[in-house]
Amino acid sequence: MAPSKRPTHALSLVPRPSLPASISAVVPCFNEEEVLSELHRRLSATLESVGVPYEIVLVDDGSRDRTWEMLQDLRGRDPHLKIVKLARNFGHQLALTCGLDQAHGSAVIILDADLQDPPELLHDMLKLWQQGYDVVYGKRQQRAGESISKKVFAFLFYRIFARVTGFELPSDSGDFRLMDRRAVDLLQAMKERHRFIRGMVSWIGLNQTPLEYKRPERFAGTTKYPFKKSLFLAIDAITSFSYAPLRMASYLGAMISALAFLYILVVIVLKLRGINFPGYTSIMASMLLLGGVQLVVLGLIGEYVGRIFEQGQSRPLYLVDRVVGEPLQNGK
Ligand code: UDP
Ligand code: MG
C-alpha cells in the first residue's frame, strides 16, 4: 500500500440543523478507582445539560483495584451507564474499541477516565459537529503535569511518524474526540489487531477539525501509560501505517554493498602495488558491524511477520466478561 497523505479536510460541510438524536460517551478505565466518582459527576452533568438521550459506556480493562465494584455501584444509581468488564487487561486501544462496539449513540465522544479530557468541551465539540464536521478532535495546546521525557517522546514521535510514513497525523492530539456515527461505523469496520486509533480515524478522511484546549493534570492517581506502553503504541503506529522501515533496510543494504565494493577496489589496487594489510582487526570490525545490522533488520522484518501472524490467527480483538446496561433510546 502506498502511504496516502492525509486528505485536506472540510471539503463538503453540510450544516446539521439540530443536535444529534442521541450521544454516547465512551471511557476506557484501567485501575481508575480514584477518579470514577468525579468523572461520573462531571460527565453526566455535561450530558444532562445537552438535553438529548445519552449513555455512558465505561469499559473496565481488567483493573486490579476496585474499579469494577465502583462501576457497579455507579450503575446501580444511574441507568444511563453501560458498564463492560473485559476478561483481562487488553490495553487502552482495544478497551476503546470494545467501548465503541457497545456505543449506540448517533454521536460518540471518547474521553480518558482521569479528566485530562474535560467533559465540558462537549458543548464546543457539538457546535462544530453542527457546522457539519464528522470528527472533532482535541488538540493539546499545553500539557500540564506531564514529565519532560513524555513531552519529548510525544514531540519526536509525531515528527518521526510523519517523516517515516508520509502520512501526516494531527500533532498533539490524543484519542479525545467527538465522532459522528458515520465515522464510528467506518472506524469499527477496520478489523486490524494492532490499532492506533487516532491514526485510523485520521485515515478515514471525511470532515475533521481540531478543537484546541489546555490539557489539565490527571485528576488523581498515576499514569497508566508508562514509557514501555507508549513505545509499543508508537511502534504499532508506524508499522500499521507504512512498510517504509523495510524499504529503509533495503537502502541500508545497498549502501553497505556500495561501500564494500569500493573497499574491495582499494584493497586490490594496494595489493597490485605490493601493499598488504594485516587482516584480523578489519575482519572482526566488519563482521561484527554487519552481524549487528543483519540482526536489526531481521528484527524489523520480525515486527511485520509477527503482526501478520497475529492478524492471521484472527482471534477476537478482546474478550468480554460481563456487560450491564440497557439499550439506548434513539440509538444508531
Ligand atoms: N487505559 C486502559 N488500559 C490500559 C492503560 C490505560 O484502559 O492498559 C486507560 C486509562 O484508564 C485512561 C486512558 O486509558 O482512561 C489513558 O490513560 P492515562 O491517562 O493513564 O494515560 P496518559 O494520560 O498518562 O497518557
Ligand atoms: Mg491521562
Image (tube, grey):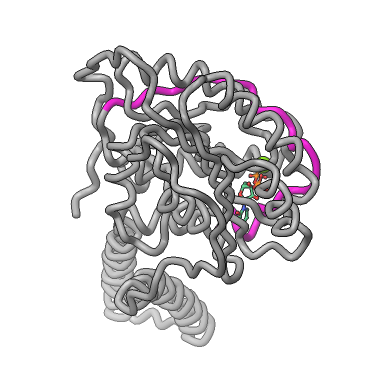
| Residue 22 to residue 313: above or below | above
Q: Which one is nearer the viewer's eye here, 233 or 94?
A: 94
Whether 219 is among the magenta residues is yes
Q: At 34% across and 61% down in the image, what residue appears?
A: 192
Q: Is residue 6 left or right of residue 100?
A: left
Residue 258 location, quadrant: bottom left
Q: Which one is nearer the viewer's eye here, 296 or 156?
A: 156
Q: Position of residue 242 (x, y in %)?
A: 31, 54
Q: Position of residue 40 (x, y in %)?
A: 68, 37
Whether 124 is among the magenta residues is no
Regarding residue 297, the answer to whether it shows in the image is no
Picture quarter with the N terminus: bottom left
| Residue 286 to residue 181: above or below | below
| Residue 156 to residue 244: above or below | above
Q: At 55% across and 69% down in the image, what residue appears?
A: 321
Q: Which one is nearer the viewer's eye here, 26 or 153?
A: 26
Q: At 59% across and 43% down in the image, what residue appears?
A: 79
Please provide the residue range marked out in magenta. Answer: 207-231
Q: At 35% across and 69% down in the image, what residue appears?
A: 304
Regarding residue 146, the answer to whether it shows in the image is yes
Q: Position of residue 118 (x, y in %)?
A: 63, 27
Residue 247 location, quadrant: bottom left
Residue 166 location, quadrant: top left
Q: Is residue 225 left or right of residue 220?
A: left
